[in-house]
Structure formats: C-alpha cells, structure tokens
Amino acid sequence: MMNDTDIPGYNNNSLDLETGEAHLIDESPLIISGDDTAALESAASDRIPAIVISSHPENVDFYFRYIYEDVNMIDDLVKRRTICRYRHLPLVIAENDVILLKEISYADADELFELYKSFDDGNCIDDVFSLKGDYDMNDLSDALLDYIHKSYEISDYGIYNIILKKNGTIIGQCGIYDHNGRQYAMYFIKENYRNNKYASAAVFLMMSYIRRYTDLDIIYASVSHTNAPSIRIAKKFDLILSQH
C-alpha cells in the first residue's frame, strides 16, 4: 500500500483548477435540485447545467445526466464535472502540489503527437485511439476529437494528461481504457522526466478518483515483462498484470 509520503507534494485537499478553464467553471451557474419539474424545466430552457437529487432516477428526463439519490454524494468535483460536461471543457480530476491530471482536449494535439512518437509502447496508444500504422498529425487530431466525444461523455473514466504544474508541460499520461471487454490502466512518463516518482503519484491520484467516483473493480495492466518499474506500480495498486 502506498503512503502519502511516497508521493511528491501530495495534498489530499487540493482539487482546485489552476488552468485557463478555471475562471469559466467557477463563474458558471449550476442548479442542484430535487426532481421538481418546474425547476428542471427552467434549467433546461435556460441552458443551465443541473444536478438532480432523486430516489427514482428512472423518472428523470435523460437531459439530466447527473442524478444522485443523496445530496451528500455531491462534492466539489461532482459539481465541476457536471459543468465541464455541459460546457465541453476538460476536467481536472485530481492534483497534488507538483502534478495535475486533466482530461485531453483537442488543443493538446500537437504536444501529444510528439509525446506519442517518443512513447516506448505504441501498441497501447493504438488500442486507446484506434490508430494503426504510421499515423500522422491529421490522423491523431481526428482520433482525439472522436475519443473526447465518445469517452468522457459516456464514461466517468478515461485517459488523462499528466501535467507538471510549474510550467504546464504534459509529461505523460495515465488513465483507464476499454479493450476486449476489459478495463486496462495505462501510465507512462516522458523519458527525461522519469525517476521522479511522477508515475506513482499520477497512478495514486487516478486510482483514488476511480475508486471513489466509478464502479470499476477489476482493472488490468498490460505491461512488458521487461518493464520492472511499471510492474512494481501495477502490483502496488492491485492491478491485474497482463504481461507481454
């Protein structure tokens, strides 16, 4: 089990955004309501994101995706996620003092193209984004746009950029993706940023989010049998190893 002291700058209370989207999210109106028809109709007509509290979610209009039976389930991250989904903004799911985990945006395409081309295991990227062969920048841009619409909007998990907070650089990625009916964890750090515990910190934050906000239980990790650091991380976070 990993302790907080193993993670550079870990702060469990820090979930504030420090990106360009923070101002938009903080100023966005949000309605939290019971299944009151008038209030929900008003939210829909005024195009205001809403969280619904209802003991009968099957009776709530599909327009309102985020429905909870207990108001105590609604924390700051749930509120931000609801606004981000409605406004089509990338969500920061977790952070510590050093790194933050943020959903992919279309604007990341240039930086991600260079990142993926330097990645040791291209098969993982192919599985996530359905990219085959020697893809180019246009292929990746199209794949990212398709992924953003189909992943975050449908599931409450996905792939996240690992961003170094001091300069905003994407230093790697981690997250969960679906493959052959299973959920796999992915995590990697750019070579020149390795050996700083960034991968362990990122997977800790990711798994904390996954365990709290999703129903995922069994998660696999496809790792090369020669990649000792990744195997150690998989074992530390109880991921089921699928070595190749």
Image: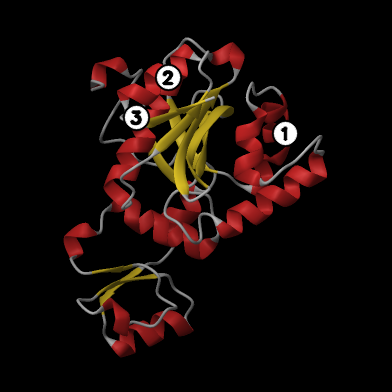
Helix, strand or loop at mark 2: helix
In percent of width and height, residue 179 lies at 53, 46
State the separation of the CA atoms marked 2 and 3.
15 Å
> Looking at the image, is 112 positioned above or below residue 61?
above
Which label's residue is closer to the chain start, 2 or 3? 3
Q: Residue furthest top?
A: 195
Helix, strand or loop at mark 3: helix
Mark number, residue 231: 2
Q: Quadrant of residue 16?
A: top left
> Looking at the image, is 90 positioned above or below residue 120?
below
Which label's residue is closer to the chain start, 2 or 1? 1
Which residue in the protein does label 1 denote?
113
Which label's residue is closer to the chain start, 1 or 3? 1
Q: Quadrant of the C terminus?
A: top right
State the separation of the CA atoms marked 2 and 1.
26 Å
The residue under the point 25% across, 16% down is 5
In percent of width and height, residue 221 lies at 45, 32
91 on left or right of 217 = right
Mark 2 in CB contact with mark 1 (< 8 angstroms): no
195 on left or right of 150 = left
- The kind of residue tagged 1 is Phe
Mark number, residue 204: 3
The residue closer to the viewer here, 8 or 113, is 113
Q: Quadrant of residue 75?
A: bottom left
30 on left or right of 192 = left
- The kind of residue tagged 3 is Phe
Q: Quadrant of the N terminus?
A: top left
Q: Is residue 56 visible?
A: yes
- The kind of residue tagged 2 is Ile
